[in-house]
């Protein structure tokens, strides 16, 4: 089983990524770090506790991530896409108890599984960058890091050139591109095609499979309605963050190119991810997903979310 430590900001696609990771038979979720992003850090934490309690996995430790970006700016949230509470129309119970651990307790977790943990970060990169700032030597003991973020060859989803996780904290994103190794980046140029439709959702919810089943349709419906306003003509919604988890369990489904990446902090190009893809450009250290096999994605998405717990 692959040990996974998820940094996230649930958020609808983050929540489905958490469900996918919890349900996948080849994954052992050893911890979750909740940071600001789609919603506040407090809301992201409440949502993570809720999902874990539904799965009967309240034993999985949750660590308190960042509340705002390294730039010091006030974070921008996205209720119009993810809902006021980050789970579309679902309101997690307010009295849900859970012990939120200190961020630096993460280092003990990483040390207890030397070279065994894959970090998958599907949110703003602030918390992960702080982990490198505070404990670079300990972070050298992770097996690998996978990040959902950036955009190459395609427009951004927040600005003409920038994707949400990178523009949300470009300083942190650049730090991770510089420091995290081995690093795989799953950018918008692949996740923009992670389309899930009504028909796929019907296949996942045609009967009760697991405690997440009743939530999938309502959160999908909210998310797909938001997406139809964002991307006219798109039938369905994009589940960016699930694709980052699949980069661990289905590496064969991606085409990767090895390049170094810089993230811009200049005003007009803020959050833009830049790499040299000219044919004669030398290989870099990061793996960047440039294409993927959609049939494998959708088959795994449906199969795993239909698993019984
Ligand atoms: C990314 O931004 C967030 O809003 C999504 O959850 C995903 O991680 C897509 O750009
Ligand atoms: Ca996310």
Image (cartoon, rainbow, N blue to C red):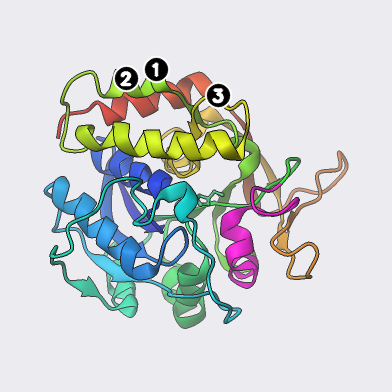
Residue at horizontal 38%, vertical 71%? 65
Q: Position of residue 259 (x, y in %)?
A: 72, 50
Disc nearest the viewer among 2 and 3: 2
Q: Badges 3 and 1: C-beta atoms under 8 Å apart?
A: no
From the viewer's perspective, is 192 left or right of 238? right
Q: Is mark 3 within 8 Å of ligand 1?
A: no
Q: Earlier in the sequence, mark 3 or mark 1?
A: 1
Q: Is residue 1 visible?
A: no
Rendering quarter of residue 109: bottom left
From the viewer's perspective, is 270 left or right of 236? right
Q: From which residue to which does the magenta span run?
A: 156-176
Sort mark 2 into few (<14), some (14-19) or many (20+) by Cα contacts within 10 Å.
Answer: few
Q: Is residue 235 above or below residue 190?
A: above
Which quadrant: the C terminus? top left
| Residue that numbered label 1 is attached to | 199
For numbered disc 1, what is the local secondary structure?
helix
Mark 1 to mark 2 CA distance (whole Å): 5 Å
Rendering quarter of residue 274: bottom right
Q: Is residue 213 above or below residue 43?
A: above
Disc nearest the viewer among 3 and 1: 1
Mark 2 to mark 3 CA distance (whole Å): 22 Å
Q: Position of residue 247 (x, y in %)?
A: 48, 40
Residue 202 circle label: 2
Q: Badges 1 and 2: C-beta atoms under 8 Å apart?
A: yes
Q: Is residue 215 above or below residue 182?
A: above
Residue 293 circle label: 3
For numbered disc 2, what is the local secondary structure?
helix
Residue at horizontal 18%, vertical 20%? 207
């Amino acid at each position: 089983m692959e040990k996974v430590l998820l940094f996230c900001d649930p958020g609808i696609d983050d929540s489905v990524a958490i469900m996918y990771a919890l349900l996948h038979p080849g994954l052992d979720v050893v911890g979750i770090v909740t940071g600001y992003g789609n919603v506040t850090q407090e809301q992201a934490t409440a949502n993570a506790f809720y999902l874990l309690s539904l799965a009967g996995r309240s034993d999985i430790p949750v660590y308190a991530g960042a509340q705002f970006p390294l730039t010091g700016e006030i974070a921008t949230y996205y209720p119009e896409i993810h809902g006021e509470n980050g789970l579309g129309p679902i309101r997690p119970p307010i009295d849900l108890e859970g012990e939120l651990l200190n961020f630096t307790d993460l280092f003990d977790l990483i040390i207890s599984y030397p070279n065994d943990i894959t970090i998958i970060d599907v949110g703003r990169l602030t918390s992960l960058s702080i982990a490198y700032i505070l404990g670079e030597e300990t972070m050298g003991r992770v097996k690998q890091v996978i990040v959902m973020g950036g955009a190459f060859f395609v427009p951004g989803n927040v600005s003409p050139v920038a994707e949400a996780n990178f523009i949300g904290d470009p300083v942190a994103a650049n730090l991770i591109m510089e420091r995290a190794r081995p690093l795989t980046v799953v950018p918008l140029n692949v996740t923009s095609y992670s389309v899930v439709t009504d028909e796929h959702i019907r296949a996942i919810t045609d009967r009760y499979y697991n405690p997440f089943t009743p939530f999938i349709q309502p959160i999908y419906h909210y998310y797909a309605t938001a997406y139809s306003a964002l991307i006219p003509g798109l039938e369905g919604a994009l589940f960016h963050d699930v694709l980052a988890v699949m980069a661990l369990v289905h590496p064969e489904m991606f085409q990767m190119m090895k390049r170094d990446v810089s993230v811009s902090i200049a005003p007009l190009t803020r959050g833009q991810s830049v790499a040299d893809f000219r044919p004669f450009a030398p290989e870099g250290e990061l793996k960047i997903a440039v294409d993927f096999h959609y049939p494998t994605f959708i088959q795994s998405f449906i199969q795993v979310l239909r698993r019984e717990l």
